Amino acid sequence: MKKLCNVLTVAALLAPSAALASGYYIPEQSVNAAALAGAYAAHTPGADASYYNPANMIGMADQWQIEADLVYINLPGVSYTDSLAAARNGESKEEQFLIPHLFAVSPKINNLRFGLALTSPAGLSKRWQDAFPRTSAEDFSLRVLELNPSVAWQGCDKFSLAAGVRLIRADGEARSYGTIPVPGPTTATIRRDLEGNATEYGYNLAATVKPVQEWDISATYRSKVDLNLEGDATLWSDAIGAPFNLPATTVVRSGSVTLPVPAVLTIGTAYTFDRTTVELDYNKTYWNVYENLDFNYSAPLGHPILVSAFDDPKAKNWSDTNTYRIGVTHRCNEQWTAMLGFAIDENPVPDNTLGFELPDADAKIYSIGARYRYSAKLELGAAYLFVDKESRVIPAAAANSGGINGTFDNGGAHLVTVGMQYNY
């Protein structure tokens, strides 16, 4: 199903972990956000406020502000150790990515300001070459691009609102190849080859209240977006003996699938003590919308093994997740600003539906960064973020739908972000 993007969500539509947060969601899109471990909703002094909290654009200096960032992401290979047979062990390939981001905020127009953000809010890449993992995830990759224009309105000195439109473009690939057991007893060797894309829309809302000059309280909401993917799929099975007695078969069909990009609610508060700002954020990601992965075809597949492997709905039953973040920003002097962050991030995937395309786990996130004001117009910045995923044990009692009974280790990510902001 070409675009089926089995890819797209089975692990993804949305993250690093290959996402840098739960599921396939990627919250760290700029130098400031990465340096503060994503604790960046209430106090957003840069042009990246156009993405993280456009309501805060109101309080910024009355000029054009433009920020360009480049993000390097390293995903170490994830190792899988099976509890029953060493032959089922495997390790995914290490992945490297370079992703650009762009943010802009306009000068004031009456009591309005306009912003624009070009980001990559979700993503996935997992490649396995060992026999058992490859059967379900030889190559799962997802690329997501979001264009997010927004407008902010100032109700009074202590209150501002904002709204925007999310335009999301997603491209993905899904390939798998391996041997599965079938009634007989015998086995079947099967393969799938999917590619696809989708363009969909959503919205975002934001509000900020300032009880006093030093204190910011903010809330942002990014809507759920359903990716309605359409394309082609090439599915193959080798010859199968009794009781099926089927020759080798290649099936090509048009198909479709709907995959959710979940809504995200963020509530944050920040207080500035002289030169130091401390921010606490809470994220709620509504992953419960991902109940199953169900492909629909233009005509029946006509092959019982291919129907079972690639047509029958696959339960996901993901759960909503909570993320708790703290970030500290300290203005050292007129030129230098230092930042530190920490977060605790839950994962949404239950033991019984976890798969090799996204072997997610709970994580702790650590970050550090700095900004340097070169002149009144130009500011430079850099940040490092480390995602430390816990080991994930899938016991036999979980009755995992993919037959997984073992331990995933070494998950996580390294992220290095450099950027510059120009004001005029």
Image: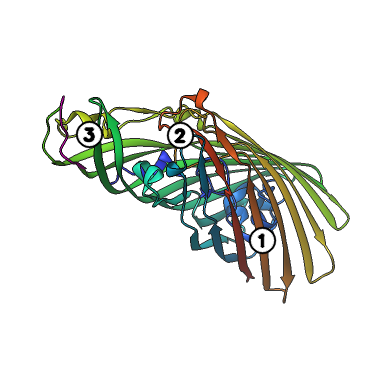
Q: Residues within 10 Å of mark 1 (few under 14, many from 20)?
A: many
Is 237 colored magenta in this rendering? yes
Q: Earlier in the sequence, mark 3 or mark 2?
A: 3
Where is residue 167? Give x, y as percent: 42, 48
- The magenta-colored residue range is 236-243
Which residue is tagged 1?
Answer: 384
Q: Earlier in the sequence, mark 3 or mark 1?
A: 3
Say if 134 sits above or below 313 in the image: below
Residue type indicated by callout 3 = Leu
Where is residue 149? Give x, y as percent: 49, 52
Instruction: Using the image as rendered, state which of residue 246 and residue 51 is in the foreground.
Output: 246
Which residue is tagged 3?
Answer: 306
Quick check: marks 3 and 1 in contact, CB under 8 Å? no
Q: Which mark is residue 404?
A: 2
Instruction: Using the image as rendered, state which of residue 176 and residue 289 is in the foreground.
Output: 176
Quick check: marks 3 and 2 in contact, CB under 8 Å? no
- Say what secondary structure mark 2 lies in: loop
Q: CA distance from mark 3 to mark 2?
A: 20 Å
- Say what secondary structure mark 3 lies in: helix
Q: CA distance from mark 3 to mark 1?
A: 45 Å
What secondary structure prevails in the magenta region?
loop
Residue found 30% across the figure and 35% down from its top: 180
